[in-house]
Image: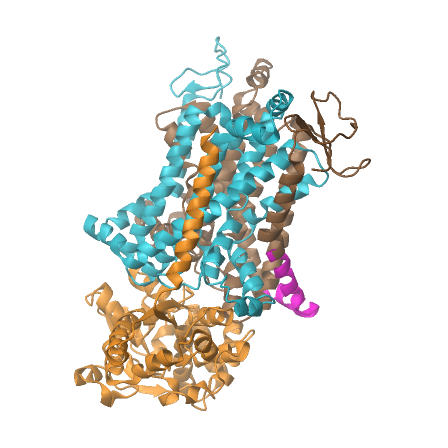
Chain colours: A cyan, B brown, C orange
């Protein structure tokens, strides 16, 4: 039932929960119910798992929690995770900028096919992402014996983990930048070029400042995913403790050693990273909302 | 660089320009390819060759060559063997579990994602900003961590699982509702979540929610209030306005969000293995079957199933792009 | 924006440094990689320390032993795909055979290279139940009762799970006087009571002990004792069935890999040391049944193993791994059939 006899048509799109009813918003009861449903749903599916990670991590006290990071294997896992992210993220950053430039600034034949290919790793199962590298570089592959004779280790070593990580985080930065750069158009760049700037000058001084927050946002998401990837890395890692185990694999090992407090402690570190990512992202949105307008679309 | 033309002023038209040697400090103008037909529309901006070339090389090295390798491996299997693997009851069932759970999870996400997006855009309430930030949690939280946490939550002894388990609070409450007709209160099902197909759905809801919210949200934010006002002025009830005016406008975004959540869910592995029972024919998803094939020394079989999933993933993405193109034509954006 | 190029440069520098450390870390002292299955984590953690000390004392050299653990089949596949293992210590003879056949890295006659068919320790399958055994589970036959939930991993991916399956098969075959159809029916009823098939033995133990799912866990003997140590003896009881399987987890040197890496001597010494009194005692202390009980220094450790009827895989009932593997666990084998819904 709506109330037809309301005289004032409140056309504000944003209405406080206690505002009086207008035909362009819902009745307070409906509003409250919807808010409650949204909050309850998010609490049940998203917030509770996060809370559980921290509760389990501190179950045996802060001493056990911090002891988990004193372990040599956990430290090497953290170091390896940082190393992998430090290689994979910059590479995908350069690619993301190049791909976004070429897709957003030009019209060419086969463009939508190219963007579909760029998106592909996003919907490929992580298991398959790892498997393709085993099939390509593994000892049973065509390249395997040659790599072995050259003494190059890819699979079950750091390069394989880096490759698998690059694969799964491949589209993240490009996906953030393409809609943003499309929305911004090319007029700024054209103005700069007409004023005598070179291509590189235009990129560094005009384009990059325009996209910097969207770029940072993409880097954050890419980094979080790079550090947290499990399925693909698990296939190519070989699980050599202290050599090829990243943090998510270390969590699995600790879990399999019945060391749940330590497993959740390492997990909480990754969850903390996720929270920091979200925090920075929110700050960016509050301060630079307009410049990020195109980046809400995943 | 051959093919780059320079002019002292920006061109006003896209027409062909006479060739000049590159002059430093002047504006480079791109004319890709030979004169006549060109697959790229000429543009004043430089760098097409560089960025397009780099994109292609990097894409090929990281994505295309490994995927071609996978298909070559799958192609090394005789055709009848491929058909046998692809149509084996267990393969079909695993694909059905994967796609069925993903479909249910994506539908749940459409309903709740719409509500969440609506609430975030239209209402102001305490904690809205926090809720908005948390939507992205599944993007940032490692899937293995999510899987361990979800299975601990929804296991029969977990915080949530214990509510639903046999003789749990909800079970007892339902049993106490003796006023219900037909004695249905006596039929108190033992609702297990973890280690059943429902567990898979829960994990897939977790990873898929942000896709729906984040595609619907911007469209809702840019929605013209005038349309709603016009509908109300013309005597439509609020419900009619929502169903006939707002929802149709949201359809492309909802479809895109649905397809993205679905595509992501089909391949999910890390969070699902911890919470699914992994029983063949019941709760075994296709990626788990690939891992099992790999562990049985059956790389070719694994490659066949992986190839099937890859093709489906690619088709899904094409469909998403088509929806977006359709929506751009119809509404001017997504 | 001057900071952006600097950021990029800094990123590249970090990447280069990361690569450099990754490379230098590999050029350390002599290392040995032992690729093993899931439940041996604790055994090899202790044994590696003991061996490193022994190697230092006898040769003066330093050796660092790296471990990789996982499902036995997965580990074997990783070695086939190029995981540079010096030695493999897996759950099943069939997994090492697969490495020998598919990659040629291991000599085909590997079983003859070390004493006791290259099996330094054996084990068996027991029942782990909740304290006081509320469902009164005492024998294999009790597992198919209504309302009994059995936790066991997936035999397709877990070596231990295959031993579980074969132990049940051996008992049922004997109880049904060799009637194969009835035996299959028993196995089918047993797996009908399994709510979760984890991919590895460790996953099943976590499901049973940590998540408190199920009434009985079919587990390696050593794994069952480990649960008592790790989760508290107050919560669980171990039940020995009247008969079980003689599980023989074998070990082997990966010949081609040790040749390439120059670790043949230390790899051989490593596996030999498993058979030494120290190695055998460590195995017994970790609840593995030593192949040479005479060498164990503490007789109490041997006395702790109850004597039960143990059936070998080489028994005519199974006819060895080469016959049993395809029949029971191969593609379309009996295990696949019991999960195929009736048409």
Q: Which residue is painted at 39% across and 49% down in the image? A: A82
User: What residue is drawn where x is 42% and y is 78%?
Assistant: C92
**Residue C202 falls within the magenta-colored stretch:** no
> Would you say B195 lies left or right of C294 here?
right
Relative image position of residue B317 (x, y in whole percent): 62, 45
> Which range is magenta?
B66-89
Front residue of this view, candidates A187 and A40: A187
Left or right, C299 with respect to A265, comes to: left
- Front residue (pair B49, C152): B49
The residue positioned 41% from the left and 57% from the top of the image is C22
Q: Quadrant of residue A158?
A: bottom left
Residue B82 painted magenta: yes
Left or right placement of residue B146 versus residue C285 in this view: right
State whether residue A204 is above or below residue C135: above
Q: Is residue C253 above or below residue B42?
A: below
Q: Judge whether residue C339 can be spotted in this image.
A: yes
Decide whether the magenta segment is chiefly helix, strand or loop.
Answer: helix
Q: Residue furthest top?
A: A7
Q: Is residue B217 visible?
A: no
The C terminus of chain C lies in quadrant = bottom right
Point out residue A215 in the picture as x, y percentages from the top left corner: 49, 34
Answer with left or right where residue B315 lies relative to residue C333. right
Q: How many marks?
A: 0
Q: Quadrant of residue B166?
A: bottom left
């Amino acid at each position: 039932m709506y109330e037809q006899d309301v005289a004032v048509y409140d056309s504000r799109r944003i209405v406080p929960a206690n505002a009086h009813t207008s035909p362009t918003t819902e009745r307070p009861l409906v509003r409250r119910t919807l808010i409650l449903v949204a909050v309850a749903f998010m609490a049940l599916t998203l917030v509770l798992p996060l809370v559980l990670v921290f509760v389990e991590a501190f179950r045996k006290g802060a001493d056990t929690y911090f002891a988990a990071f004193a372990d040599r294997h956990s430290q090497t896992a953290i170091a390896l995770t940082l190393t992998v992210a430090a290689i994979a993220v910059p590479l995908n950053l350069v690619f993301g900028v190049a791909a976004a430039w070429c897709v957003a600034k030009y019209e060419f034949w086969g463009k939508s096919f190219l963007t579909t290919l760029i998106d592909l790793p996003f919907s490929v199962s992580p298991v398959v992402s790892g498997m393709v590298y085993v099939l390509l570089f593994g000892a049973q592959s065509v390249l395997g014996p040659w790599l072995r004779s050259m003494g190059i280790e890819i699979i079950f070593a750091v390069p394989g983990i880096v490759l698998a990580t690059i694969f799964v985080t491949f589209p993240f930065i490009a996906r953030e930048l393409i809609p943003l750069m499309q929305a911004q158009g090319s007029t700024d760049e054209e103005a700069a070029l007409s004023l005598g700037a070179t291509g590189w000058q235009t990129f560094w001084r005009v384009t990059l400042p325009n996209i910097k927050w969207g770029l940072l946002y993409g880097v954050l998401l890419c980094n979080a995913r790079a550090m947290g990837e499990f399925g693909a890395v698990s296939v190519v890692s070989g699980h050599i403790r202290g050599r090829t185990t990243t943090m998510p694999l270390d969590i699995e090992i600790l879990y399999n050693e019945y060391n749940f407090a330590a497993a959740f402690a390492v997990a909480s570190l990754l969850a903390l990273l996720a929270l920091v990512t979200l925090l920075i992202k929110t700050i960016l949105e509050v301060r630079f909302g307009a410049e990020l307008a195109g980046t809400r679309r995943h | 660089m051959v093919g780059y033309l320079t002019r002292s002023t920006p061109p006003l038209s896209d027409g062909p320009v006479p060739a000049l040697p590159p002059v430093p400090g002047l504006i480079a103008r791109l004319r890709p390819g030979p004169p006549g037909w060109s697959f790229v529309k000429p543009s004043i901006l430089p760098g097409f060759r560089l960025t397009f070339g780099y994109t292609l090389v990097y894409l090929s090295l990281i994505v295309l060559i490994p995927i071609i390798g996978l298909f070559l491996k799958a192609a090394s299997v005789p055709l009848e063997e491929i058909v046998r693997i692809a149509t084996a009851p267990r393969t079909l069932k695993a694909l059905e579990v994967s796609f069925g759970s993903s479909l249910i999870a994506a539908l749940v996400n459409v309903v709740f994602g719409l509500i969440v997006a609506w609430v975030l855009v239209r209402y102001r309430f305490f904690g809205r900003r926090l809720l908005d930030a948390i939507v992205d949690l599944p993007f940032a939280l490692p899937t293995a961590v999510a899987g361990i946490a979800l299975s601990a939550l929804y296991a029969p002894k977990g915080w949530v699982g214990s509510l639903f388990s046999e003789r749990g609070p909800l079970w007892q409450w339902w049993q106490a509702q003796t006023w219900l007709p037909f004695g249905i209160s006596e039929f108190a099902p033992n609702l297990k979540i973890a280690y059943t197909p429902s567990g898979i759905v829960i994990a897939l809801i977790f990873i898929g929610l942000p896709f729906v919210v984040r595609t619907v949200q911007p469209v809702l934010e840019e929605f013209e209030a005038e349309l709603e006002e016009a509908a109300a002025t013309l005597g439509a009830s609020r419900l009619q306005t929502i169903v006939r005016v707002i929802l149709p406008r949201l359809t492309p975004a909802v479809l895109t969000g649905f397809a993205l959540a679905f595509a992501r869910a089909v391949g999910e592995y890390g969070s699902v293995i911890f919470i699914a029972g992994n029983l063949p024919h019941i709760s075994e998803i296709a990626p788990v079957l690939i891992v099992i094939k790999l562990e049985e020394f059956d790389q070719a079989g694994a490659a066949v199933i992986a190839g099937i999933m890859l093709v489906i993933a690619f088709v899904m993405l094409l469909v998403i792009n088509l929806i977006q193109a359709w929506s751009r034509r119809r509404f001017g954006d997504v | 924006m001057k900071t952006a190029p600097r950021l990029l440069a800094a990123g590249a520098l970090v990447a280069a440094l990361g690569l450099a450390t990754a490379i230098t870390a590999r050029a350390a002292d002599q290392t040995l990689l032992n690729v093993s299955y899931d439940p041996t984590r604790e055994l090899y953690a202790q044994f590696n320390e003991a061996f490193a000390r022994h190697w230092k004392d006898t040769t003066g050299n330093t050796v660092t032993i790296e471990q990789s653990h996982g499902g036995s089949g997965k580990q074997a596949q990783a070695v086939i795909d190029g995981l540079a293992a010096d030695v493999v210590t897996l759950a099943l003879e069939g997994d090492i055979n697969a490495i020998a056949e598919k990659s040629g890295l291991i000599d085909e006659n590997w079983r003859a290279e070390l004493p006791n068919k290259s099996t330094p320790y054996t084990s068996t399958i027991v029942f782990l139940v909740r304290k006081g055994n509320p469902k009164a589970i005492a024998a294999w036959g009790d597992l198919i009762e209504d309302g009994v939930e059995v936790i066991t991993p997936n035999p397709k991916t877990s070596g231990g799970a295959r031993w579980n399956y074969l132990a049940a098969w051996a008992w049922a075959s004997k109880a049904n006087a060799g009637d194969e159809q009835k035996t299959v029916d028993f196995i089918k009823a047993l797996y009908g009571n399994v709510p979760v098939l984890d991919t590895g033995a460790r996953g099943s133990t976590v499901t049973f002990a940590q998540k408190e799912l199920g009434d009985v866990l079919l587990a390696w003997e050593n794994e069952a004792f480990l649960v008592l140590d790790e989760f508290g003896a107050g919560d669980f009881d171990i039940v020995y069935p009247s008969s079980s399987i003689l599980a023989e987890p074998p070990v082997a040197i990966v010949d081609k890999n040790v040749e390439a890496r120059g670790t043949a001597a230390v790899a051989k010494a490593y596996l030999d040391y498993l058979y030494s009194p120290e190695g055998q005692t460590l195995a017994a202390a970790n609840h593995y049944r030593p192949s040479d009980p005479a060498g164990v220094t503490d007789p109490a450790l041997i006395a702790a193993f109850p004597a039960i009827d143990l059936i070998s895989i080489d028994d005519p009932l199974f006819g060895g791994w080469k016959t049993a593997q395809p029949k029971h666990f191969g593609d379309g084998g009996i295990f696949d059939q019991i999960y195929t819904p009736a048409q």
